[in-house]
Image: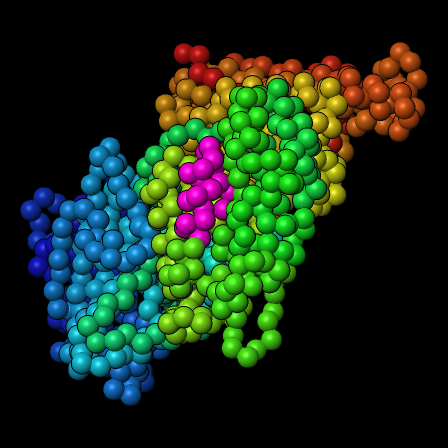
Amino acid sequence: MITVKNKLFNITTKNTSYICHVRDGKYVENLYYGKKITFPEGADTEAMVEPLREKFNNVYGNTIAAAGEDKNLTLDNLNTEFSYPAVGDYRITSMLLKADNTFSSRFYFKDSFLYEGLYKDSDLTKMPHARYYEETGKPWTLELIFEDEAAGLELRLIYTAFEDCDVITRRTVLINKRDSSVAVRKLASMQLDLPGKDYSLLTFDGLWTRERHLNEKKLISGTYVTESTVGTSSNRHNPFIMIKKNDAGEHAGDCYAFNLIYSGNHKEEVEVSEYGKIRLIQGINDWCFDMELKSGETFYTPEAVMTYSDLGLNGASANCHDFVNNHIIPEQFRGKERPILINNWEATYFDFNRRKLTGLAKDAAKLGIELFVLDDGWFGDRSDDTSSLGDWDVNEKKIGGPLKDLITEIKKEGMDFGIWVEPEMISEKSRLYEAHPDWAVKAPGREVYTGRNQMVLDYTREDVRDYIVDKLSKLLSDNDVSYVKWDMNRHISDAYSSGDCDSGIFYHRYVLGYYDVMDRLTKSFPHVLFEGCSSGGGRFDLGVLCYMPQIWTSDDTDPNERMMIQGGTSYGYPLSTMGAHVSASPNHQTLRHTSIDTRFQVATMGVLGYELDATRLTSLEKKTVKKQIEFYKQYRKLFQFGRFIRVKKDPNLEIWETVSADRDLAIALLYQAQSEPNQSDDILFAKGLEENATYKVTGRQIQISIKEFGNLINMVSPVNIKEEGVAQAMVNSLYAMDGEKEEYLVTGSMLMHAGIKLNSRFVGTGLGEGTRTMGDYSSRLYVIERMI
Ligand code: GLA
């Protein structure tokens, strides 16, 4: 709900209030953002917000006085909704414009406009945006209109309130009403000024194979910047960030979360001002951004997302999860369970033929896998990563005939078919490059720098986009394809177009081009499930999720690393968006050995897939995988759409949980990174349950490879088994030891507040029934079912 009373704007959601008002007739002061505050029915709210107004009873030292009646007021210490230079506010600013040879702006409040529904010009932005459905309630939108009379510019701040998930979205719109151009050097989507400075900043950073690791820093004086300059939202720094009061934790305390519905260069800045206030700004990165906004033109910034919760980091994450599942994901995939897939990449890499593919498909189908995904190498003349990107024609020689025939064979096994593409790229060694060298992004006369031997296709050009849409449309209409993995494996470096795009706006126009292609393809093929990918999780953002309901979280499938990658990602994105695969051991990225059950159990917290050579699994492994898939299918809805909670965060032992909406069912994952000798027993806690209900807690039965015990196995084996010997290999392929069986009856309150003291761990003794053998990288799943 949003109310406007004279010049007081009160944006409320289920549990939050965002209040600002016009001060001195010109400025809009932010009065409050946080837990919902209420006013008595019929109260004079304008008078009642007096306690929230910043007081300026005297002049602050050598400050600049704001123009207006209040001669004491300085913008340097006022919480405002946006900012620009030259008015004495020396903090970071949300915009930088140059008109009439000056950087001085004077945007003053003119009017406001309130209506039900989304921002009325959402479609004109040519960017994806949040949506709503009847059951999520119709949002309200507020536009605050400002004018810089001298410059002839209008600025609109747009706020949309999504009540159901405590989210408010923001964007800034600039309209050039003058006769000449204005240079736009920076225009952020949102600014939030908060009183007080006792906050910590949480960012999600990394690189290829280690995306979105959580980093927390206590904010002290100065400015903190998180940004991407690679052309996409990047694996380096995700646009999702959080700030929390220093005393807030996972389950309680004041937390704010921010994100951007945008897939390009972004920037998040947080300043602790000299007056001890927080200013947070988020939007398109102003790095290499220099736009000429011509007379009569409008510039729309991407939609920013913010939420607040007093229920700690988990509370803010829950709001983000609901927002993504209910307002971002394409309608046809909202709440829709996703298939379990097998991807041939780590099984074959580029080295495959018809026999290998169908062999893999046959074995995968027997395990219960539902979708076969053919990865890189099926097109052009591609047998490594040096050629053919852009030539999206099937290599029939390699796959042994038309694609249709391969698909028919796979479908006969009872599986759907999916395919990998990387349509934003061009190889120098390709027919496309021979025909259109100017379609590659490169700077004139400058030596070409490649990444993974490839160049980026110039998506600012319409002819390039038309070519790609035509090629992919043909692929998808000629073949029965139900899933597409859309990859993007290199960063942009020389931001230059041979077309009509100025370099100062290249990065943004590239993103708009990408959205145009995605928009056209997803409208033509709405049934196709697109999974985003960019060298793993290098473009994991809300813009992508508006078209593709899930994203390949990382090329790194090592479960220990995945605890950090999926764990970090979970702060801003729900389980339904995270592709999580079981791969081979030792892992191809880290060479770490882990059990097939740990690989699976960590992957259950996401959208499950397999990415290994199923034909080489031992008969015991096959049995194990079959059971895993049955288990996942039984609880798939919970694993993909349950309420995800980080129950316990300890560097060595974590508990994650997913709980059904009705609290009747939950599954907890307990993960231990390294085994510690002779420690006291683990306690299993859960959250989000019904206090008074009775639950049965059952440990998922796992099996432990005899290899894990080395020669200790001889203590229980009737025959002597030599370590690493043939006998061990044989026994190991057929037999594994049953792990402990644990079952408890508890009330919700017992499990949430006291916890279950689990069976003792193996501590050098106790190699027998009942002992929990928890070595390095070990895990357990506990099913929690409501009985009464
Ligand atoms: C990227 C992806 C991988 C795989 C390869 C294929 O690295 O992240 O999953 O598809 O490309 O070249």
In the image, the segment drawn in magenta is 468-487
Identified at 47% across, 57% down, the residue is: 233
Residue 682 placed where, x, y %?
63, 28
Residue 397 drawn at (x, y percent): 64, 41
Q: Residue at x 37, y 72 (%)?
A: 500
Q: Residue at x 41, y 57 (%)?
A: 465
Give percent across and percent down for residue 619: 73, 19
Q: Height in image: 601 above or below 46?
A: above
User: Foreground: 140 or 670?
Assistant: 140
Does any portion of residue 704 appear in the rendered image? no
Residue 629, by quadrant, is: top right
Magenta-drawn stretch contains 103: no
- Give residue 457's position: percent from left, percent from top: 49, 61
Is the residue 76 above or below the residue 610 in the image? below
Above or below, 239 against 647 in this view is below
Q: In the visual, does 615 lie left or right of 166?
A: right
The answer to whether 553 appears left or right of 787 in the picture is right
User: Is 309 placed left or right of 398 in the picture?
Assistant: left
Position of the C terminus, as image quadrant, is: top left
Res 474 quadrant in image: top left
Camera sees residue 412: yes
Vertical arrangement, residue 440 with respect to residue 486, above or below: below
